[in-house]
Amino acid sequence: MKASDQPAVPSRGRRISGRAQNPASNDPYHSVEKMPDGTCCPDCGAVFSEGRWHWGECAALGPAQTCPACRRIREGAAGGILTLKGDFVRAKQQELLSLIHHQEELEKAEHALNRIMDIAVDDDGITVRTTDPRLVCRMGDALERAYEGALEIHHDEDGFFARVAWERA
Ligand SMILES: [Zn+2]
């Protein structure tokens, strides 16, 4: 390995507006440590190969390591929070929950680490926590497309966390 090399960081730009193109570089939960191809997450069954985590077949006796998404879930470290509020949310709760789960399915099929951590439903509305910022933005966009309403998306400076609020009276 290149333990002695000080990797020159080409850009120190930390003000990423919009989506971070390469979250693998700085996000502590997307560490770029070398793992052998075929490393399997014992918690969710995702498999590491070609530099990223995929859904695949785990070899029974292969190397095992918890994937970043399962680490986030275990540590309660959300990458995104989506809140849904308003009378419409109370009236259409099941329909909105279906949309949220559907968006997760679509996202997760391509990006194994982008998942729902948990969903809380109370009198105020619905709160969804995800393992990454992209998924809550996707859900917010889908809500606005389907039902209009008021959408607010806020990315933190590093681009590793997003807070999305959607409201419809
Ligand atoms: Zn996992």
Image (tube, rainbow, N blue to C red):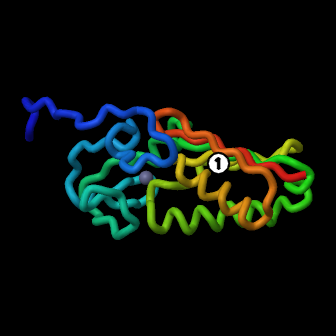
Task: Name which residue lies at 64% across and 48% down.
Answer: 118
Of residues 151 and 66, the one nearer the viewer is: 151
* Residue 139 falls in image quadrant: bottom right
Relative horizontal placement of residue 104, taking residue 127 as reference (left or right): left
Quadrant of res 16: top left
The residue at 56%/40% (across/down) is: 155
Residue 138: percent from left, percent from top: 60, 58
Viewer can see residue 78: no
Instruction: Residue at 64%, 67% (x, y): give it.
Output: 102
Q: What residue type is labelled 1?
A: Asp
Q: Please provide percent x and percent y for residue 74.
A: 51, 40
Q: Which residue is drawn at 13% across and 29% down?
A: 6
Residue bearing mark 1? 118
Viewer can see residue 107: yes
* Residue 135 rendering spot, x and y as whole percentages: 56, 54
Residue 36, percent from left and from top: 20, 54
How busy is the neighbourhood of tag 1: few (under 14 within 10 Å), some, or many (20 plus)?
some
Residue 91 located left or right of residue 22: right
Tell me the element at label 1. Answer: strand
